[in-house]
Amino acid sequence: MMRLFVFLTTLVLFQACNAEGDKTHPSDYVDYVVLGKSINHRQSVNGDLKLLNTVFFAEIFPIDLTSGQTTVTNGVLTGPGDAENGLSFSKERIPFLAGQREMTIEKLTKRYPDSTYNFSFDTPSGPIKDFPVSFSGGPNHKNNPGPIKINLHQDGRTADINAIDPNQDLKVTWSSFDKGSQDPNGIIDDMIYVILGNCMGDEIAHSGHAISDLHALTFDKTEFVIDSAILSSGEAYQLEVEHSNMETDIDRNIEIIVTYAATSFLDFKTEGYSDKNKECPAKPYAMDGGQTDRDRRSD
């Protein structure tokens, strides 16, 4: 009888430990949060860069970027300036918010001072309240990278952006990321992002997200190749290249990225005739909120 009692007691303790181990934390659902300021440019056919805007933004990245489920909800950002009464995140799978855009970082900083902002959101394992993330900059803090010049190459030569061969891979290069460097905290080095979109504003290729994608582009990379299988004849496409100068930290097992970024947008067209039914607008629909010179698709 004693042996049975000891066995049952051990089993109960084992099950209790397992139950405790099964409990989840918000960090089981949230990988990292981002707070940033970005400068956006449009690159013309001739290679000229036109300033579009500057923007304050924030994002919450879930652990599983491939899941169809939304696991981070009810996101709100509070802080100084325009964030005093709270800014709501989108209801998308990767919650996002962008503040009022300005034409200079100085004007943007008057609206959104370089100070501490607090993330609050819900996860299936409970809420995160007042998660602090801080800009370290002061009045003379200029961490945003310089404007990015994008170049396209095929067959070892500079490609004509109005006559890209859809049967060849397309190599994308960019001006040097001079402010990029390794992360002293060992969380994530400064990043480069390359995104390809179609004329309808849909993203069709991405170089990879920070932290979650081991093959994503870091500051020392110089090119990204778009597979010809993605391209079709007689189509309009759009490229986005971003340099992201980042500061990192970690709190409650959730990583923190504060980014000072620069982005350029460039359109290109492929040779031939399209056999697709979609009707492209005269200029591609915006695939990014930074493209304030473009219409957004209404549907």
Image (cartoon, helix red, strand yellow):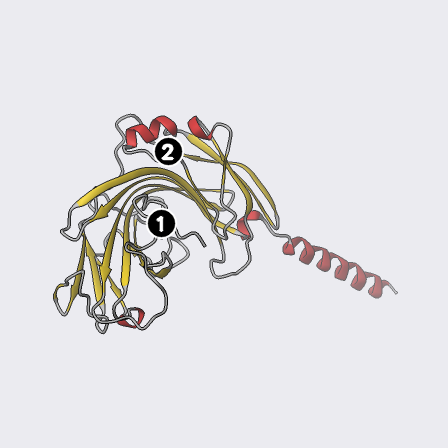
**Relative image position of residue 119 (x, y in whole percent):** 50, 38
Seen in the picture, residue 147 relative to 80 is either above or below; the reply is: below
Image depth: mark 1 or mark 2 in front: 1
Element under label 2? Answer: loop
Q: CA distance from mark 1 to mark 2?
A: 24 Å
The residue under label 1 is which amino acid type? Answer: Asp
Q: Which mark is residue 135?
A: 2
Q: Residue at x 69, y 56 (%)?
A: 19
Left/right of residue 91 with respect to residue 209 in the rendered view: right
Q: Which mark is residue 53?
A: none
Element under label 1? Answer: loop
**Relative image position of residue 167 (x, y in whole percent):** 23, 74
Camera-nearest residue between 51 and 112:
51
Name which of mark 1 and mark 2 comes first in the sequence. Answer: 2
> Which residue is labeled 1 in the image?
288
Residue lying at the far right in this picture: please name it: 1
Q: Residue at x 19, y 70 (%)?
A: 165
Q: Residue at x 48, y 27 (%)?
A: 84
Task: Give the crowd class for mark 2: few <14, some 14-19, many >=20 residues within 10 Å.
Answer: some
- The image quarter containing residue 225 is bottom left
The residue under label 2 is which amino acid type? Answer: Phe
Seen in the picture, residue 85 relative to 170 is either above or below; the reply is: above
